[in-house]
Image: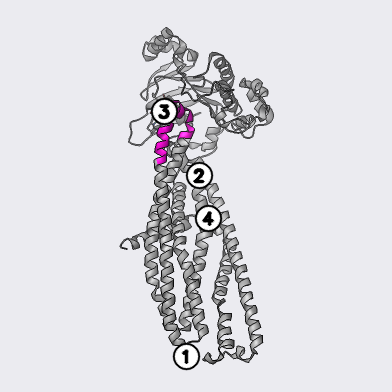
Amino acid sequence: MGHRPKKLKETLPGLSRLIRRFWPQIQKQGGLLILSCVALLLETALRLLEPWPLKFMFDNILLKGFQPAPVPVLGQLSAVTLLSLLCLGLVAVAILRGAMAYFSTVGMAIAATHVMTEIRGNLYSHLQRLPLAFHSKAKSGDLITRVTYDIERLREATVTAALPLITNLLTLFGMLGVMLWMNLELALIAIAVFPLFILVSLYTTRRIQTVARTQRKREGAMAAKAAEAIGAIKVVQTLSLQTMLEGAFAKQNKKSLKEGAQTQKLSAGLERTVEILVAIATSLILWRGVQLVMQNAVTPGDLLVFITYLKTAFKPLRQLAKYTAQIAKATASGERIVDLLDTVPTIRDLRGARPAPSFEGKVHFNNVSFAYDAGAAATLRKISFTVQPGQQVALVGPSGGGKSSLVSLLLRFYDPLEGQILIDGHDLREYTLDSLRQQISIVLQESVLFAVSVRDNISYGCLAATDAEIEAAARLANAHDFIQALPQGYDTILGERGATLSGGQRQRIAIARAAVRRSPIVILDEPTTGLDQENEHEVNEALTRLTQGCTTFLISHNLKAIEQADLILYLENGQLLEQGTHRQLLALGGRYAALYALQSSVGVGIQQRRSPLDPQPYLLN
Ligand code: ADP
């Protein structure tokens, strides 16, 4: 019991934080919510009225002798008229109450759905705007659960728990009020059972909430694990990790089952306790009430109202525990949503950012240093170089040297710790993110295609592209012919991750996607690694056309492929050790020259790092 106040303190701020956070969305549904509340109040009043026709039948018709003070109007009516009126009243109250309950439930449900749909939309767009630094740490399965499951749980709780909870509490207090007005002594007996009930219910609810929270966390972790394993199914099967992963999953699954069973047990136990409390209260009231009736202090009808109220008021109380548990769970879900919404994107448009003009393509890195985590060792150290518009820059050096990190700074996936990156003489951060990224195209080693048509996949490069522009881009990318040969041509829907195309074909669609953007800056991150000779040739041809006249950043392990570059940057350990043209670097006789000599002696095969684990589906098609 000692923990109870702390727990209450914990739940309520959570709830009020949710309401405050979502207030703008709730406010938009204001009209509907007010109407629903009015219906709700009327419903409560009608519920209070329900046993009264019965009371009058008892006191004014059946047992006239017990009547302590005649009710003015009812007394003058004949017994039959009165009976008919009361019977009609009984039905009328039931119908009206039903109608009001219907309006309040439907109204609330519609309002809640509107609110949640809006929040879900906000959450989704917020998620998409969170920087890579966030996404590389977050588990995608967990994020997906928040957008789908947690939101749904919150919506459901408003309609199936919060609304009945409010109705029941109103009814409860209404009934207590009427009871106090009718007979103080009997009312106090009913109230006496209350504290007991509240203690029991709060204690159990607290335990349910704790278990539910753990379970919720576990389910998020399980979804993340499943998503990870399914995403890497090829690796999992190749390494025969299924059994091991199944075992780990089964363990979590079992724990979640146990927790689920525990919450069920707790709430079922609570319901039984409340039933016993109702029985105790009823018998206490009867014990004293019947004596009062015999002393003519109350009428039998009054006693009838009391007993009915007790049952009606306590019945919802039994569910009060269920509702509070459900609300507690939903609050936990809601907090997960708010936590996510409150994650501020570190990479965003700075104040005063303006849309970028059309770039010429001059790129200047001025003493740029960068680290993925503040405090961690720097990934890039004091990098400086300049590229003129239309030039090709090649980034070479051992893996982990910082090549990909360098180009991700250009896309402003991250901001440098020190130094500046200038395009056409202006700091990247002066421009809005969208307008900056719009002018940069990128082709990666493993291109991601979406499970939509080929046409849409290409148009994702530039949503405004016309069909003719899409086709032109596909031709440029050497992709038009094979696309035409697909079952539905440009309208063929690609399998998830583009699994129905060969690696080379996927690359060419990715090149078409880059081409349709017509951006002045192009980034190629080992786009031909892993392709066979024939595919490589086709892709290279496409790339040459794509990069025509563009400032191009090319990351490559194959030094032969970059001999013609206007500028070669040799990166190792985050440092730019050498820069210059192929000739200059050979003449320098440093790292680049050594690497070049090594590659020449073993042939070009070095970059053909193909292995059975490589996720590209060469053999499908
Ligand atoms: P390269 O492209 O030359 O192989 P990268 O730029 O990918 O090199 O990596 C440079 C260094 O930064 C490596 O030590 C790598 O482990 C680290 N790194 C890359 N991406 C991340 C990331 N998202 N979070 C933390 N460290 C990273």
Residue plotted at (67% across, 22% down): 485
Q: Quadrant of residue 282?
A: bottom left
User: Which amino acid is tagged 1?
Assistant: Asn
- Say whether disc 3 or disc 2 marks the residue closer to the N-terminus: 2
Give neighbour class at mark 1: few <14, some 14-19, many 20+ (Cα, 10 Å): some
The x, y position of residue 387, in whole percent, is: 48, 22
- Say whether disc 1 or disc 3 marks the residue closer to the N-terminus: 1
Quadrant containing the N terminus in the rendered view:
bottom left
Q: Which residue is mark 4?
A: 156
Of 264 and 555, which appears nearest the observer?
A: 264
| Distance Cα–Cα, label 3 vs label 2 | 32 Å
Q: Main secondary structure of the magenta part?
A: helix
Q: Is residue 243 magenta?
A: yes
User: Which amino acid is tagged 4?
Assistant: Glu
Of 324 and 6, which appears nearest the observer?
A: 324
Q: Tell me which segment is drawn in magenta.
A: 229-250
User: Which amino acid is tagged 2?
Assistant: His
- In the image, taking residue 250 as reference, residue 157 lies left or right, namely right
| Distance Cα–Cα, label 1 vs label 4 | 50 Å
Secondary structure beneath disc 2? helix
Q: Which residue is mark 2?
A: 126
Q: Is residue 40 magenta?
A: no
User: Which amino acid is tagged 3?
Assistant: Asn
Verify CB contact (< 8 Å) between mark 3 and mark 2.
Answer: no
Q: Which residue is mark 3?
A: 366
Q: Is residue 332 visible?
A: yes
Give neighbour class at mark 2: few <14, some 14-19, many 20+ (Cα, 10 Å): some
Mark 2 vs mark 1: in front: 1
